[in-house]
């Protein structure tokens, strides 16, 4: 007899699965998000980030961030600098891949230069 198994992988967003098992016992809670950093670009797509801190009770078994959450939960990223000149179109595939799609007759990171 031949058996067939179906393997289903669930991709859980990091924001749902990153709390440590010791979150409650360490009395962990999030502080407010810090201000956004400056954008890495003024046009053509850039990136900015912010961070937040986690607070926990003062105990030897609760002495670091990882006793509350995974490192990636303390950072947030966003796209910015979405301006494109000369009727160029801003394109965003992800926070890591953004650009201006220039119309005919213009070029440059932000479609700022005329080809004429």
Image (tube, grey):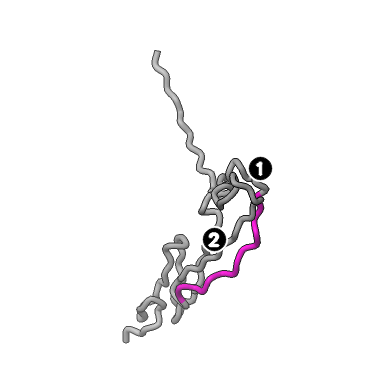
The residue at the far top in this view is 1
Mark 2, Cα crowd under 10 Å, few <14 / some 14-19 / many 20+, is some
Secondary structure found at label 1: loop
Say whether residue 100 is visible: yes
Quadrant where the C terminus sits is: bottom left
Viewer-proximal residue among 3 and 59: 59
* Residue stretch in magenta: 28-41
Q: Position of residue 114 (x, y in %)?
A: 36, 85
Q: Along the horizontal axis of the image, is 100 left or right of 12? A: left
Q: For residue 9: magenta?
A: no
Relative to residue 47, is residue 17 depicted above or below? above
Mark 2 element type = strand
Q: Residues within 10 Å of mark 1 (few under 14, many from 20)?
A: few
Q: Residue at x 42, y 69 (%)?
A: 99
Most frequent secondary structure within the magenta stretch: loop
Residue 53's x, y, as percent?
60, 59
Q: Which residue is mark 2?
A: 76
Residue on which the image places disc 1: 25
């Amino acid at each position: 007899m031949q058996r067939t198994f179906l393997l289903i992988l669930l991709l859980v967003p990091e924001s749902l699965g990153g709390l440590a098992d010791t979150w409650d016992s360490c009395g962990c809670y999030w502080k407010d998000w810090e201000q956004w950093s400056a954008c890495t670009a003024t046009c053509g797509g850039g990136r900015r980030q912010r961070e937040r801190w986690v607070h926990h009770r003062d105990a030897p078994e609760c002495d670091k961030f990882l006793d509350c959450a995974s490192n990636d939960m303390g950072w947030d990223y966003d796209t910015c600098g979405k301006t494109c000149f000369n009727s160029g179109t801003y394109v965003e595939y992800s926070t890591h891949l953004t650009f201006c799609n220039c119309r005919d007759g213009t070029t440059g990171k932000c479609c700022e230069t005329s080809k004429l």
